[in-house]
Each structure stands twice: as C-alpha cells, then as structure tokens.
Image: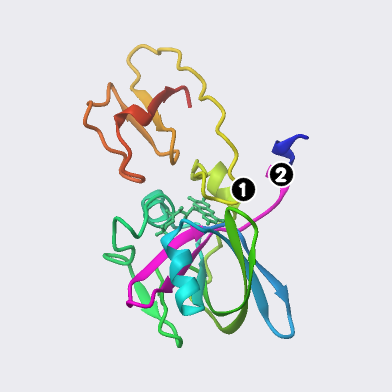
Amino acid sequence: MDLTALFKASYGLYVVSSKNADGKECGCVINTFTQVTAEPVQAIIAIHKDNVTTGAILESGLFAVTPFTQQADMKLIGRFGFRSSRDIEKFDGVASSVDQNGIRYLTECTAACYSCRVVNKIDVGTHYLFVASIENAEILSSDEVMTYAYYHAVKKGLTPPKASSYQPKQASKPAAPVEGKKKTFRCDVCGYTVEADNLPADYVCPVCKKGREHFVEVTE
Ligand SMILES: Cc1cc2nc3c(=O)[nH]c(=O)nc-3n(C[C@H](O)[C@H](O)[C@H](O)COP(=O)(O)O)c2cc1C
C-alpha cells in the first residue's frame, strides 16, 4: 500500500475549541472537519483521545470550529496545534469571542464560526469521531481560507503525531555549504525555519517550543 496516496485527499485547517466541566477553555488545530448532512446541518470531527480539547468536548458535549484564513502565521497555528492546553492558556493574548453556547472561539485569522452540539460519538481507536449538530454558523471574514495543502506548501508546516493524517517524516535534505550565505535550519517537529550562521545550544523554537536538538540544517 502506498500511504503517500493519502496526501491526495483534501482538507482545510481549523481550530476546534471547547470548555470542560470546571470552565477551562481549550482548543486545538484539526484538519478533520467535514459537513456530513444538510438537513439537519451536521458535521464530524476526528480528534485524538489524549488532546485536552477532547476531554472538554466529552464533558460539555459542545464545541466550536473556526477555519483558519491564509493570514494565520505559524506562531498562531503552533499555539493551537503544537502546544497543549495542559501547558498554556490557548486563548491568552489572541483575539477571541464566545458563542451562544458559552464556548470561546478564535476570531484572529479565522473565516467563520460553527457552533456545534455532539449528537453521537464513535470510538475509532486513537481518535473519537464526534458527530455534531451545527446550531449556529456565522462568517467572520471574507479572506481566503487555508487549505491543508496551502499549510504544507506555503507555510511549510508539518503534521504532529496526534493528527489523524500523520505520517512519519521524511529525512530533510542535507545542506551543501554556500560561501557568504547564512545557513537555514528547520525544526523537525513543526517545520519552522530560521536563517543563521549557527543556532545557540539554548535556542527554542518560537512555534512549538522544542529545543535546538530538533533543528536540522537544510538547503531550502
Ligand atoms: C496541521 C495540524 C493538523 C492537526 N490535525 C489534527 C486532527 O485532525 N485531530 C487531532 O486530534 N489533532 C490534530 N492536530 C494536533 C493537535 O492540534 C495537537 O495535538 C494539540 O497540541 C492538542 O492540544 P490540546 O491538548 O490543548 O487539545 C493537528 C495539528 C496540526 C499542527
């Protein structure tokens, strides 16, 4: 089986957010949101059992989904997609609002908001599929939405192991030295690149917060 054939499937890129029984607000990036019926308006998401956001959805039965626009930078995507609500308050310092169900959702670089109520849960091993009724939908911006292909091709982002579509990474191309030109280092966790003569031992990735040992010198 050629698993790279699955790279031909198309997705968008979204933040799904929720609130647990203690009122903690959390959210994470998913690429697995799809509308499945028109009457009633229903959608599914696939979300990893270990994500803090998943626990909150199980407790509240509610979540909001917001598609990213192309303006979203890697720091914003990394905040929701490479870091956990166990370690940070995801909504601190970013623009957000609260929907009719009391669920906080990201308004920064997002095109719409779908307020969802869980109507079914399917256990698919590492992930749950939540089937939800969309109780409200509103447009937040007319900017182009970010597709998963755009995220890979233009943002040069990677996919972490908890994403449904994760595949083990290919080795980066080794760099050929060019005189007078700074080197490019790429984080092998999130894909962030930085140009420098060298990276100090205590360098921390600004997107996923991993250490210097995750940076590999690349040619492009
Ligand atoms: C590009 C991208 C796609 C992702 N897709 C999914 C997904 O479809 N399902 C999922 O459970 N996690 C996905 N993730 C991973 C979660 O966003 C990540 O594990 C996050 O840190 C969980 O945060 P939380 O613990 O605060 O819920 C994706 C991350 C990125 C960067």
Is residue 57 at least partly visible in the picture? yes
Residue where numbered disc 2 is placed: 6
Residue at 45%, 75% in the rendered image: 59
- Element under label 1? loop
Residue where numbered disc 1 is placed: 165
Percent position of residue 197, x then y: 28, 21
Percent position of residue 49, x then y: 51, 58
Asked if the residues shown at circle 1 and circle 2 are in contact, with their CB atoms under 8 angstroms apart, the answer is yes
CA neighbours of label 2 inside 10 A, class few (<14), some (14 to 19), many (20+): few
Q: For residue 8, which quarter of the picture?
A: top right
Mark 2 vs ligand 1: CB under 8 Å?
no
- Element under label 2? helix
Residue at 60%, 81% in the rendered image: 134
Percent position of residue 102, x then y: 40, 84
Report the magenta residues as a range.
Answer: 6-29
Mark 1 vs ligand 1: CB under 8 Å?
yes
Amino acid found under the numbered disc labelled 1:
Ser
28 and 155: which is toward the camera: 28
